Image (cartoon, rainbow, N blue to C red):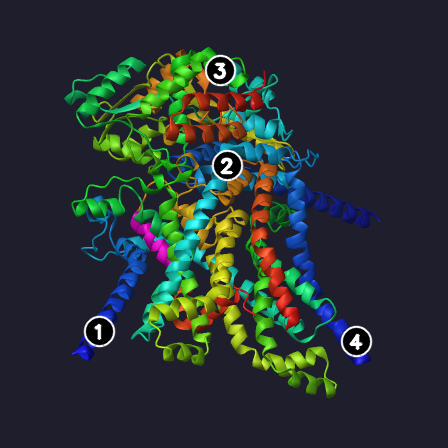
Amino acid sequence: MLYQRRELLKAAAVVLPSIIAVGIFVYGFIIWSFRVSVSAWDGILPNFTYVGFKNYIETFQTQRFQTDLWNTLFFTIFFLGLTVTTGLALALLLERSVKGEDVFRTIYLFPMAISFVVTGVAWRWIFNPTVGLNALLQKLGIPVTWGWYTDPSTVGPFHVALIPLIIAASWQFSGYTMAMYLAALRGIPEDVIEASMIDGATYFQRLTLVILPLLKPITLSALIVLGHISLKIFDLVYVMTGKGPAFATDFPGIFMFETTFRGNHYAQGAVISMVMLFLVAVVIVPYLVSVFREGRRA
Amino acid sequence: MRRILTGLLLCVVLAATVWAGAQKEEENKVEIFSWWTAGGEAEGLEALIEVFNQKYPEIEVINATVAGGAGSNAKAVLATRMQGGNPPDSFQVHAGHELIDTWVVAGAMEPITFIFEENGFLDKYPKGVIDIISYQGEIYSVPVNIHRSNVLWYNKKVFDQNGLTPPRTFDEFFSVAETLADKGITPLALGDNGIWASTHLLESVLAGSLGPERYRGLWNGTTRWDGAETKRALTTFVRMLEYVNSDHAALSWDAAAQYVADGKAAMTIMGDWAHGYFKSKGLKVGVDYGWSPSPSTSGMFIMLSDSFGLPKGAPHRDAAIKWLTVCASREGQDAFNPKKGSIPSRIDGDRSLYDEYLQAAMDDFASNEIIPSVAHGAAASEAWVTELNDVVSVLVADRDVDKAAAQLQKIADKYAKK
Amino acid sequence: MRAEYALRQKAAARIALYLVLVVGAVFFLVPVYVLLATSLKSFTEVNIQNMWSLPRTVSLEGFAKALEKLGPNFVNSVLLTVPATILSAFLGSINGYIFAKWRFPGANLLFAFVLFGMFIPYQSILIPLVQFLSRIRLYGTLPGLILTHVVYGIPITTLIFRNYYTEIPGSLIEAAQIDGLGLFRIYRHILLPLSAPAFVVVVIWQMTSIWNEFLFAVTITQNPRVQPITVALQNLAGSQIVEWNVQMAGALLAALPPLLVYLLLGKYFIRGLLAGSVKQ
C-alpha cells in the first residue's frame, strides 16, 4: 500500500507542471483580464485604477457592440441550422452504400483541414461584388449588382451582409458534422436496424422513428461544439470581410481585437473578452459537467 | 620599478582606449523606427539616411522598419517596445494629436523645442505647423513631410468631353455631379474599405462648410457637433454619397482612383498621394487628370504629416538629436520629399526639385490657412478618430444625420479639451 | 409488372442520390477551382472578363511572386509547427497516461479543470498573454508563439491520449505493479510501445491546428520577418494593389502542408477531429 501511495504522489507530481501552466495561462489570465476590464486602462500605458463596471456599461451602450451581439445571434442560428442539416443529409446519403464513398467523404471534409485564412481569401473573392459571383452571373446574362458582404441593408436587425459569411462557415464545418454523424451511424447496432426493417417500415419511418432519436446525443454534441465556435468566430471574418459597412459583419472577436491591439483601449477589449467568455461558458460548462458526471459513473 | 610603472601606465592607457572604443561602439548608432518599407516612402527614407551619413559618417543608422497593415503592425510593435522600456532612438508617428495624445501626454517623449531654437529653424516653419506639433508651448516632433488631404482629382478627358470645369463650391459640385450622372458616369469615386476614406471625404466637407476657424473648433470643443452648421455639413456629406459608386465598401482608395483613371468615374477626393498613384500608372497631370482644392475649401490647406520625435530613455540620445536636426533641415527634407511625393514642411524648400503639382502645393502651403486633418491623426487623438470612424461607418450606411450628430457630440464631449 | 416498376423506381432513386452527391461535391470544390484557376493566370489575364474562366495559358508568375513574398514565412511556419507539435504531443502523452491510469484523489476534477481550457475564447486571455510574453521578453518571437501553442494545446492532447490509454486493459498495468515496476517504467516499457496510433493522431491534429492558427499568430508576431504564413497571407491580401493571382497562389501555398497530411493520413485526422467533440 505504501507503494501505491508513493506512486500516486509521483503521478500527481508528474501532472503538476501542466496543471500549473493551465492554472496560470487559463484561469490566472482570465482573472487578470477581468481585472483589466474593471480598470481605467485606456491608452498605451497600463493603468489599474479600479473603476467598477463603468467600462461594461459604456461598451454595452455602443452601437457597435449591440450590432455585434445581434450579428452573433443571427449568425449562430443560421450557421448551426445550415451546418447540422447539411452534415446530417450528407451522412445519411453516404450511409446508403454508395460507390466512391471515400472520394465523396474526402471532398466534403477537406475544408476542415485548411486554414480559415485560406478559405477566407477564396470566399472573399467569390463574393466580391466586382469580380466574383456577380461577374459570373453577368457573363451568363443575368445582371446582378448585389453587394454581398458590402451591402449595409438590413431586414429588421438582421444584416444581409452576413449571408456570405454563413455560407462560407457552413461550407467549412458541414463535413465535420457529417463525420460526427457517420461515426454515430456506424455505431448503431445492426440488429436495431434489422428489427425495424422486418416491421416493413418505409425508409422515412425508420429515419424518424429509429435513426434520428438514436442520433440525438450527437446532434447535441454538434450544436455545442459549433455553437461555441460561432461565439468565438474571428479568423474567417477578419480575413473575408472585416467589420463591414456599419458593422454589418462585425463580431465581438473582431471588435475585441481591433479595439485592443489597434486602438489601445485595453479596458474595453477586456470587457468584450469577458462577455465572450461568459457566452461560451453558458454553453460549455453544463456540457462539461454532464460529461464529468458520466465519467464518474463509468 | 620604472619599467613596471611604464607597463602599468601602458596597461591603463590600453584599457582606457579599449573602454573608450567600446563606448564609441555603443555611442555610434542610431535606431530609426518606421513603417516605410516600400516604394517612394522607402526611397525617401534611404535618401534622408544618405544625407545623415554624409554629415555624420561615424554614426551607423539602423533602419528598423515593420511592414504591413498601413502602419498598424508597426504601431503595435512600437507600443510593446515602449511599454517594455525598450524604445528606439526615434520613431515615425503622425504629427499632431496622434503623437501628442498617445505619447506626449503619457510622459513618454522629450520636448525638442531647443533643436528648432539652436538651429534657427523656428521661422522656417509656418505657424499652423508649429501649432500642430506643439503641446503646452513645447514642440515634440519634427515633421519631415506635408501631404494635402483636401484635393479633388478629376479625369480631364471626361470633364472636357462634357464641357465641365472642376467644381469650386458644393453647389457647383452637385450640378456637375447631376450632369455626369445623367451621362451614366459615376460622378464621385470612393473606396472606403476600412472606412478611413469616408472620414477623409467628411473632413473636406466639414472644412468646406464650416471654414477653418469653426473646423478647428470641432477639435477643441468650441464648435458643437450637433449644432445647425455641422448638421448642414453632414447633410452635404450624405448628399454627396448619393453620387458615389455602389461598390465603394469593397474598394480601397487606389481602386477608386483607378476608376477615375479609367474614366469610369469622373472625380475622387483624396490626399495628394493619389497624384503619385496616377503618375505610377503613366498618366500626366494637366493632360489625363487635373486637380483643384475640394469643393468650398480654396484658401485652405488640410495638412497631415509624418514626423519623428525623441522618446524618453532613447539609448543614443545625442545621435537621435542629430537625426532630428537632419530631419528638420532644408537639405534633409529636400532629399526625402521629392521621392515620397510630398512637400517639405519648411517654407524654403528648393522648388526645382519638385514636379508641377507639388510646386503648386508648396505655393498653397505658404499662402493658405493651414488646418489639421482628422482622418490622418493631426486633429484628434487616435482613440477619438477610432470612435469617429465607427460613427461615419454607420452614417454612410443609414444616412441618419441627426443620430450621427448626437453621437459625434457625445464623443467630442469625451475627448475635446476646452 | 409491379416488380419492374419497383426496380425502375429504385434505379431512379439511385440516380437521384448520386446526382445530389455530385452537386454537393461541386459546391464543395468551387473555392478550390477559384484558387487554382486564378493562381495559374498571369497578372494581365486577371480581369473581370475572364475571372471565372480557366487560364488561357498556364502562368507560374503568381506562384513565383507568392513564393518570393511568402517563402520566408512558410519557413517560419515550419519552425513554429514542428517543435510546438513535438512538445505538446509529449506533454499530452504523459498527462493522458496519468489521468487514465493513476486516479489519484481529485484526478477527475482536475481533468475537467484542464479540459475547460480547450473551449475558452482565446480573446479572454489575450491581453495578459501579451503582457506576460513581453515581460519575459518573448513577445514578437517564434519561441513565444511556440510556448503559447504548447500550453493551450495541453487540454486537447491530454484528452486524446487519456481516451486512448483508457482502452488499454488495466490488467497489464496491474501485472506490472505486482512486479514492482514504478510509474515511469510502466509508462516506458508497457504504454509507450503501444502509443504509436495515439501519437499519430495527436501529431497530425496539432500540426494542422498550429499551422492553420491565426489569432495568436497575428497578435504575438507583429513583425513580418517572424510571422507565420497565415498572417503573412492576410497581410499580402490587405496590401494596396490587388494581385488576385498572387493572393490565390499564396493561399494555396499556405494550404498545401495540411492538405497533404489530410489526403495521406485522413483517417487519423478525423480521429483527432472527433476527439474534440468529447466523446467518452
Q: Which mark is residue B203?
A: none
Q: Is residue C162 above or below residue A169?
A: below
Q: Quadrant of residue A144?
A: top left
Q: Which mark is residue C11?
A: 1
Please state the chain letter of the residue tagged with numbered disc 2 in the rendered image: A
Asked if the residue at tag 4 contacts the one at tag 3, i.e. Cβ–Cβ closer than 8 Å, the answer is: no
* Identity, as a three-letter code, of the amino acid under mark 3: Arg
Q: Position of residue B338 (x, y in %)?
A: 37, 28
**Residue at the image point whose x is 36% and y is 63% from the top:** A89
Mark 3 highlights which residue?
B216
- Give the overall secondary structure of the magenta segment: helix
Question: Which region of the structure is painted magenta?
Answer: C244-257
Please tell me whether mark 2 sits on a helix, a strand or a loop: helix
* Identity, as a three-letter code, of the amino acid under mark 4: Arg
Dot 1 and dot 3 within a common chain: no
Q: Which of B313 and B217 lies nearest the eye of the viewer?
A: B217
Please state the chain letter of the residue tagged with numbered disc 1 in the rendered image: C
Mark 4 highlights which residue?
A5
* Identity, as a three-letter code, of the amino acid under mark 1: Ala
- Camera-side mark, 2 or 4: 2
Tell me if mark 1 has few (under 14), some (14-19) or many (20+) residues whose alpha carbon lies within 10 angstroms of its own. Answer: few
